[in-house]
Amino acid sequence: MAKRVFSVALMGCAALALAACGTSKPGESMDAAEKASETLLKTGGSGDDWSAIGFSYDEQRFSPLTDINDQNVGELGIAWFADLEDARGQEATPVVIDGTLYVTHAWSKVSAWDAATGKELWKFDPKVPGERAVHACCDVVNRGVAVWGDKVFVGALDGRLIALDRKTGKEIWSTQTFDADKPYTITGAPRVVKDMVLIGNGGAEFGVRGYVTAYDADTGKERWRFYTAPNPEKKKDGAASDDIFASKGNATWSDTGEWKVSGGGGTVWDAIVYDKDLDQIYLGVGNGNPWNHGLRSNGEGDNWFLSSVVALDANTGAYKWHYQETPAETWDYTATQPIILAEQQVNGTPTKVLYHAPKNGFFFTIDRATGKLIDAKPFVDGINWATGYDLATGRPIENPEARFYKTGKPFIAIPGALGAHNWHPMSYNPATGLVYVPAQQIPQGYLQDMDELDKRKVLGFNVGTSLNKTMLPDDQAAFRAAVAATTGRLVAFDPRAGKVAWAVDYPAAWNGGTMTTAGNLVFQGTSTGRFRAYAADTGKQLLDLDMQSGIVSAPSTFRVGGVQYVAFQTGKGGAFPLVAGVAGGVTRKVPNLPRLVVLKIGGSAQLPAAPATTLAWNPPAQFGTAEQVASGKAHFGRYCQVCHGDSAIGNGFTPDLRVSATLADADAWKGVLLDGILKDRGMVSFARVLTPADAEAVRAYVIDRSNWTKAHLPTEAAPMGR
């Protein structure tokens, strides 16, 4: 009888499984349009299309087109342009299929255009609630769409994964991918693999647990989920990650520590790449929460899978291997940066590899079949947290002083938390064998000396280092030194030789992503408003166009009606401009003009005259005691600088508080800071963490900053309009 009951139960479970999942396996139920999409993503096609943000599944951002080349690129001009709505960060790479261009904007908006003429075909606004912005570490940005069959997919800031009709922009389905009561966001682009849509999330700075989920492309139903940090109780979730955490991963996390409250971090907010050759998926995993390993995990364990590249079975999400680039990470050295798939000779054998240049400053070549480290070499100068990697163990050779929570001393890290390379896409040219990396030099101080204000709060960053004690001092030389130390560089890295082949230095950091072509070209925009092309083999500059506004997005190229075009967005934004203050240097003075720009040989369209950006600067009279100003500085550092700049020096796309119309009026200031009257524009109430006396102290500090910077840094720190 027991056997009979078991058999019936088993049959019932099988029937339920069939009813829930259908009888087909992933990829078997694709229609003709979806199969055409898969073919295009696998091969990249002729180059007439740019079918995904990374061009194809390999995400090399390499186009085979040669109509625009190193002989004629200097003849590029504007074919057409379109002004966009929101003067915030524009980070998406345009996707072009069958002559239609699809692109996302700030606030997760999507639009479709006739790629040759610039006629807008449709526009979709997911109407993300403005108050969600408080959970976005690095602006209300979005990095692009995925196109599959007759659908366009976008991940919205508030966690919705949305499928749109490709021809009309009408919503087909929407699914909520995370608990909206927790400080998650989505800023990355979805990827489509075998009729599944994959999406991760952000929020590690605030305190969440990372994961990636695969959804059915036709229905939005969940197929599988893989967590990148353990269950706080170290128990199973009913997820694809259960077995690896139970067998090995849980043991790499302490049994106590702040991760039990925060979720541990490890969000996958950008890189998700499909390997068509090995049928596996690579996740680039982010930082821990808190950053401070001493608090997060009591200084114990490597903390799988933080700062790792993780390989999963594409069909089930099951773990295959991982390589942890920064074990026990404690500096916000994410591994979420773009991943490129390629082949190269390793000891005389053709090998399938992946290339990765994450925040920590080392360029990694990894065997993508096994996860074995092949090489790790610096792609920037001055790295001081480690001297290199032991290739036998795959582990970094660390500088003991870098673990500030052990020494009790401050540590000025190179690179800092903004990274030697951030999200800005890099590209790979098979003809030259070089990878083109938007690199930068942005040092950062880490400090274990925390006080009550630094402890975990319900709003703001919770990173376990002192944010309120690391702003620049009142010293003109220190401010100017910060500008001089913050630079950018376009690096052409040779993975086979393990060194930089050529480089171009920039006077400012946070420059745009790159794209390369068979025409021996590399394209990149800069945060200073230039759009440039270089010879891919030598680095010789061949094009320099004034685009009037900062460019952080990466371009794409395509061909319509026999004409090759290059498309990109302008509009400065993101983490560095938000927090940099005067260290933003010349980029602060560049207008923030959100646009979609398309170039062609002989293009003759002209941009309108750039607007004046300098604002009137008449600080209110100082009030408050020195103690009150000092208190306001501490609260500003803890809650405000990540959006309004170091020392309250604004950035030109969120309000410069030094010239705020509310600054002279205590009631108006309180209305914004505590009453939340601007929550629909992203400025929520901070009454949960600030008292009226605190708010008034912050006002006193900002007035102090307005007066001091006007007197001592009138040129470098002049307030800029949006």
Image (cartoon, rainbow, N blue to C red):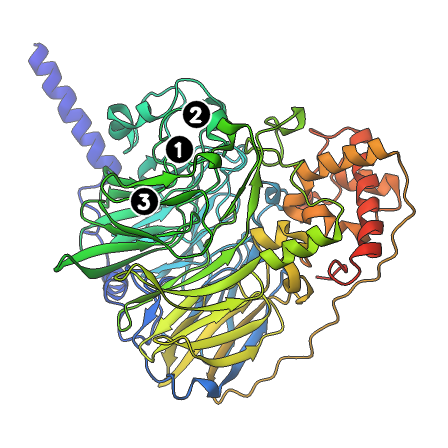
SS category of the residue bearing label 2: loop
Which of the 4 image quarters holds residue 491? bottom left
Residue located beneath label 3 in the image: 389
Residue located beneath label 2 in the image: 299
Pointer 3 or 2: first along the chain: 2
Q: Position of residue 442 (x, y in %)?
A: 55, 52
Q: CA distance from mark 3 to mark 1?
A: 15 Å
SS category of the residue bearing label 3: strand
Closer to the camera, 178 or 333? 333
Q: CA distance from mark 3 to mark 2?
A: 21 Å
Residue located beneath label 1 in the image: 328
Pointer 3 or 1: first along the chain: 1
Q: Position of residue 688 (x, y in %)?
A: 69, 28
Check the image and report above or below for 51 versus 275: below
Q: CA distance from mark 1 to mark 2?
A: 8 Å
Check the image and report above or below for 697 versus 587: above
Asked if the residue under mark 2 is in contact with the one under mark 1, i.e. CB atoms within 8 Å, the reply is yes
Check the image and report above or below for 187 versus 448: below
Callout 3 crowding tier (Cα within 10 Å): few <14, some 14–19, many ≥20: some
Q: Amino acid at mark 1?
A: Ala
Q: Amino acid at mark 2?
A: Gly
Q: Position of residue 192 (x, y in %)?
A: 32, 53
Residue 448 numbered mark, or none: none
Q: Amino acid at mark 3?
A: Tyr
Q: Residue lying furthest top in this view?
A: 1
For the image shown, how many numbered marks are present on the structure?
Answer: 3
SS category of the residue bearing label 1: loop
Closer to the camera, 704 or 243? 704
Q: Position of residue 720 (x, y in %)?
A: 74, 61
Residue drawn 84% across and 62% down? Answer: 616
